[in-house]
Image (cartoon, rainbow, N blue to C red):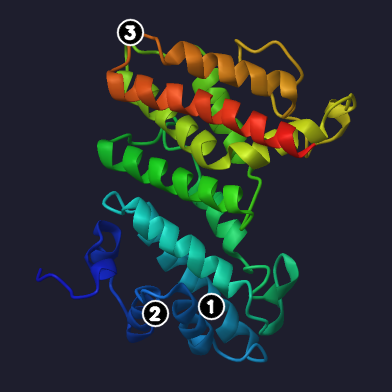
Amino acid sequence: MAEHKNPLFNLQLIRKRTLSPQKSDILNAFACEDAENAASQIDYYCPPLTEKDEAENYLWMVWDLLIDIISSPDVTYEIQEHFISILQNLQQIGKGDLRVWTGERRVWRDLPLFPQCMEVSLRDPMGEMEEFTPETAQIWRNISSFAARCMGTGTLGPYSQVVDALREALEEELDTDHNLAKAECRIQVACEWMSHGAKPLLWWARENIGYTDIADDETQYFPCGSLYKGTPAVCLQRWGFWQTRFEELGKDPRFNKEIQKAAVKAAETMTTIERRIANTL
């Protein structure tokens, strides 16, 4: 297949799709170098909100394409950052209200249906029934990186998946004897979350200082892994445990230098964020 002049069309997950003219228009809008212009074009193509079904279908289409782009195995972090800017510019456009299955939402301030699309896409691919390949590993790492960037910029989140990812990588024994690739992927995903989402995570932990009714609050209860014996919530105790584990993994000889370096960087990011927040209090 010949290379397309719009680089988004050449991404691996996009090349697998059958693109309608409407989807091609959306991809061309996304490709605008100026994020504000891209957002304006996405808004322009959106059907009137009075045409509820058409508008809702358009939103599903936009988010479906966006997620394939930012999670494609060959996507760059520069493209991901561009899409963060597009989302932020979209949120400045006041188109009106639209009732979707999650309730009344503002278009585009609330990015209707996008959080739900992200939740589905963040599903852990390492379950027993899932086929785990280098491609699925990279897709999961990319979608996690983008979700962390969304959380870090306040565009979306926080996600329960961040705690799940950190628990699996840091609070459980990693089986490097039978599947080193899975263990390495778990660490890389945890590092992505911490590299881009450490600040809101720490604020979340600070908000739970002295909070004791965790078991009665489903929104704050997160089960502990076998290595972590503390409070089952996002709290400073758990934050400190994660930091220590990143430091330990950074010295773990079972992992290559790239993994060790990423773990050390994650721990250093946590220290940096702690100092910044302490200076604002």
Amino acid type, residue under disc 1 in the picture = Asn
Looking at the rendering, which quadrant does residue 225 occupy? top right
Residue at the image point whose x is 52% and y is 71% from the top: 60
State if disc 2 and disc 1 touch (CB < 8 Å).
no
Label at residue 192:
none
Q: Nearer the viewer, residue 143 or 235?
A: 235
Q: Nearer the viewer, mark 1 or mark 2?
A: 2
- Where's the N terminus, which quadrant? bottom left
SS at badge 2: helix
Q: Label 3 is placed on what type of residue?
A: Pro
Q: Report whether residue 224 is seen.
A: no
Name which of mark 1 and mark 2 comes first in the sequence: 2
Name which residue lies at 44% across and 14% down: 249
Badge number at residue 57: 1
Mark 1 falls on what kind of element? helix
* Image location of residue 3, percent across then percent down: 13, 70
Pointer 2: what residue? Answer: 29
Identify whether 264 is placed above or below 177: below
> Sequence order check: which comes first, mark 3 or mark 1?
1
Image check: 81 left or right of 97?
Answer: left
Residue type beneath disc 2: Ala
Specify the label residue 253 is tagged with. Answer: 3
How many angstroms separate mark 3 from mark 1 (CA)?
A: 50 Å
What SS does tag 3 mark?
Answer: loop
Residue 138 showing in the rendered view? yes
Above or below residue 240? Residue 14 is below
